[in-house]
Image: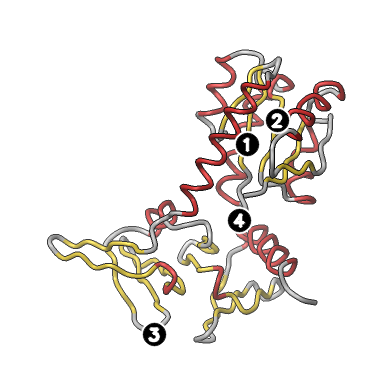
Amino acid sequence: MKFKYSIIGLDAKSMSLLNSQLSQLDGYQEVGSVENPQELLDIILSVTPNLIFINVDNYQDQNFTDLMNIINDLYRSFIQKPLLVALASTEEQAYDCIKNNFFYYLLRPITELQVQKLNYKLRSTSIAIANLPKKICLQTYSDYRFIEIADILFLKADNNTSEFFMLDNTKIVAYKTLKHFESVLPESFSRIHQSFIINQNYISRIHLGKSECHLKPIKQRLPFSKSYRNVMAKLASNLSSNSIS
């Protein structure tokens, strides 16, 4: 796997050193690094790196809490969730980051050994992602039902149960909430509404004006709510960039 990365909030000298260390490894491409920590969200929206190094020493007290709120909101709302690496001066601050959705941390001054350990963890995680389960098990007492994840079109909430709408036009009821399945399904599934999770692989149209998402091959139209508009706009942009226009 190749990693597009950005560095946020390091001075030019430290940024150059980290870039140099990463350049010694295969598969790393620097995009859009900035010294100003306030440009974090701008970087995510504009160049969409999948790995971001953040100098958390820039954030103290309330500012650090604000950063954690931004990160948590990012992981609730964004389709593509970049891996975050904290650059910290103390282990205490680094551990606070790990508890708030950061993937890893590097203690400053950053050494070559630390970067190599990060690279190993990234590669190991990439292998794990590549080997994700292909089926999901829906269990009801002693009844075990196995369905192909790739055959799921969308899920719909029905009180405390979830309905799976499948590629073959069948519907399967699972006795767990939509929130549960949101947490266990792969990232190709996106929550677009309080009542719906969709499989991105079957999107044929996203109409931002009408707040609708169309799914093939059943020509199903699903609404998305205002709170998920940014998610859908980002998803439309990502799908567009991977299509011929």
What distance separates the C-alpha of mark 4 from that of mark 3? Answer: 26 Å
Residue at image coords 76%, 27%: 18
Disc 1 crowd rating (10 Å Cα; few below 14, some 14-19, many 20+) is many
Give the residue number, with chain letter if any, for mark 1. 84
Q: Residue 99's spot in the image, x, y percent?
A: 50, 29
Give the residue number, with chain letter if any, for mark 2. 54
Q: Secondary structure at mark 4?
A: loop
- The residue type indicated by label 1 comes to Leu
Marked residue nearer the N-terminal end (4 or 1)? 4
Q: Nearer the viewer, residue 237 or 103?
A: 103
Disc 2 crowd rating (10 Å Cα; few below 14, some 14-19, many 20+) is many
Residue at image coords 53%, 62%: 188
- The residue type indicated by label 4 comes to Ile
Q: Please say if 244 is above or below 130.
A: below
Q: Are marks 3 and 2 in contact (CB under 8 Å)?
A: no
Q: Secondary structure at mark 3?
A: loop
Q: Please say if 131 is above or below 223.
A: above
What distance separates the C-alpha of mark 2 from that of mark 4? Answer: 20 Å
From the viewer's perspective, is 15 left or right of 100?
right
Marked residue nearer the N-terminal end (3 or 2)? 2
What distance separates the C-alpha of mark 3 from that of mark 2? Answer: 46 Å
Marked residue nearer the N-terminal end (1 or 2)? 2
Q: Where the C terminus falls, by quadrant? A: bottom right
Q: Secondary structure at mark 2?
A: strand
Marked residue nearer the N-terminal end (3 or 1)? 1
Q: Are marks 1 and 2 in contact (CB under 8 Å)?
A: yes
